Image (cartoon, rainbow, N blue to C red):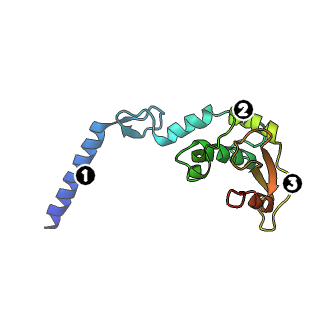
Amino acid sequence: MRGVIVSELEKSRVRSERYRLRHTVPCQGGCGARIYKGGKRCKGCHRKVRVAEMPTRLRHGYARKGAVHPLHVIWRDMLGRCENPKNPRYPRYGARGIGVCKRWHTFEKWLEDVGPRPPGKHPSGRALYSIDREDNDGDYRPGNVRWVTSKQQAANSSRWAR
């Protein structure tokens, strides 16, 4: 009985190995891995190529290689909630018609107009200032955006502004 189980497992292993060889090709990245037909490189080699193609330094100079600056996160989130329907906050921004001016689709231009975040920390440890629109129903554009504390921002929220 035991010999039958081993032979069935062996047959299964051989079948799966034949299938793998028939339906896969060697990775073109030179690592020796096998990938399914239609692909060119395995995930590891693809990642190496992408990292090699990345610029060694961001244009704005605000972050070291491989790091993301908090201002870039603020800018990216602003664009996401106004222009990406898959963003969970889109219904409160983009769906209401709030957009981002064309000039601000580039981080460097946004940073020129808005300026760096004022220094200061909240007692909880997070940054004291965040970005806010003076006209709550207006777009993100020069003249309508400012740095405010969370207390000021709460007073200007769409819940209370009438």
Residue, x 76% and y 35% (percent of image)?
A: 108
Q: In the current view of this chain or complex, which residue is farthest to the front?
A: 162
Q: Are marks 1 and 2 in contact (CB under 8 Å)?
A: no
Circle 1 SS class? helix
Which residue is under mark 2? 103
Disc 2 crowd rating (10 Å Cα; few below 14, some 14-19, many 20+) is few
Quadrant where the image shows the N terminus:
bottom left
Q: Residue at x 45, y 31 (%)?
A: 28
Residue at the farthest right position: 119
- The answer to which image quadrant residue 61 occupies is top right
C-alpha separation, residue under disc 1 versus residue under disc 3:
63 Å
Q: Earlier along the polypeptide chain: callout 1 or callout 2?
A: 1
Q: In the rendered view, does 119 fall on the left or right side of 159? A: right
Amino acid carrying mark 2 in the image: Arg
**Mark 1, mark 2: which one is toward the viewer?**
2
Which of the marked residues, 3 or 2, is nearer the chain's N terminus?
Answer: 2
**Tag shown at residue 13:** 1
What is the spatial separation of the Cα atoms under label 3 and label 2, in whole angstroms? 26 Å
How many numbered badges does the structure rendering display?
Answer: 3
- Of 34 and 49, which appears nearest the observer? 49
